Image (cartoon, helix red, strand yellow):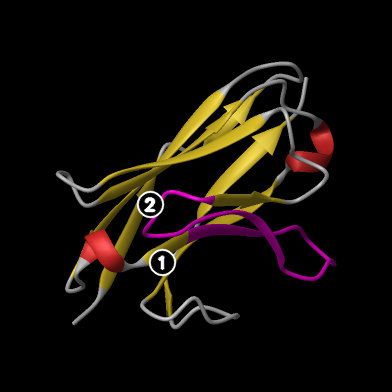
Amino acid sequence: QVQLVESGGGLVQPGGTLRLSCAASGIIFSIAAMGWYRQAPGKQRELVAYIRRDYSTNYADSVKGRFTISRDNAKNTVYLQMNSLKPEDTAVYYCTADMYNTHPPAYWGQGTQVTVSS
């Protein structure tokens, strides 16, 4: 049974930072493609960042230069470092996993709320 458990969300002021973590189990983490998606109220779900087994990455244009995705295969964990946060980054952030680089990914976490507000 695949489980993805996110943590690290919360309330932060504009310009602040947050680091999301996602602990994975039930998959061979080292060969999985891992990602972060987000969904804001009234908006479509969108891909934020993606990291493949070879550590290559993709980012949404709206977060390039501000967000960094990384993975620690020894800990079966993927991270999303979010800097210079903006109110428009407010959303529920979901961790995802897939063994075949398919979109949308096969496995999803329960989501963690990120709110950027003064």
Task: Identify the mark nearer the N-term, 1 or 2.
Answer: 2
Crowd class of label 2 (few under 14; some 14 to 19; many from 20; radius 10 Å): many
- Mark 2 = which residue? 6
x%, y% of residue 71?
35, 44
- Residue 11 lies within the magenta run: no
Q: Are marks 1 and 2 in contact (CB under 8 Å)?
A: yes
Q: Residue at x 80, y 71 (%)?
A: 44
Where residue 109 is drawn, which disc sits there?
1
Q: In the figure, is residue 104 to the left or right of 85?
A: left
Q: Residue at x 17, y 73 (%)?
A: 26
Give residue 50's quadrant in the image.
Answer: bottom right
Q: Residue at x 24, y 76 (%)?
A: 2
Q: Is residue 17 above or below residue 106?
A: above
- Name the secondary structure under disc 1: loop
Crowd class of label 1 (few under 14; some 14 to 19; many from 20; radius 10 Å): some
Which of 89/107 is in front? 107
x%, y% of residue 80?
50, 39
- Name the amino acid, label 2: Glu
Q: In the figure, is residue 58 to the left or right of 41?
A: left
Magenta-tinted stretch: 35-56
Q: Is residue 49 above or below residue 98?
A: above
- Name the amino acid, label 1: Gly
Q: In the figure, is residue 24 to the left or right of 105?
A: left
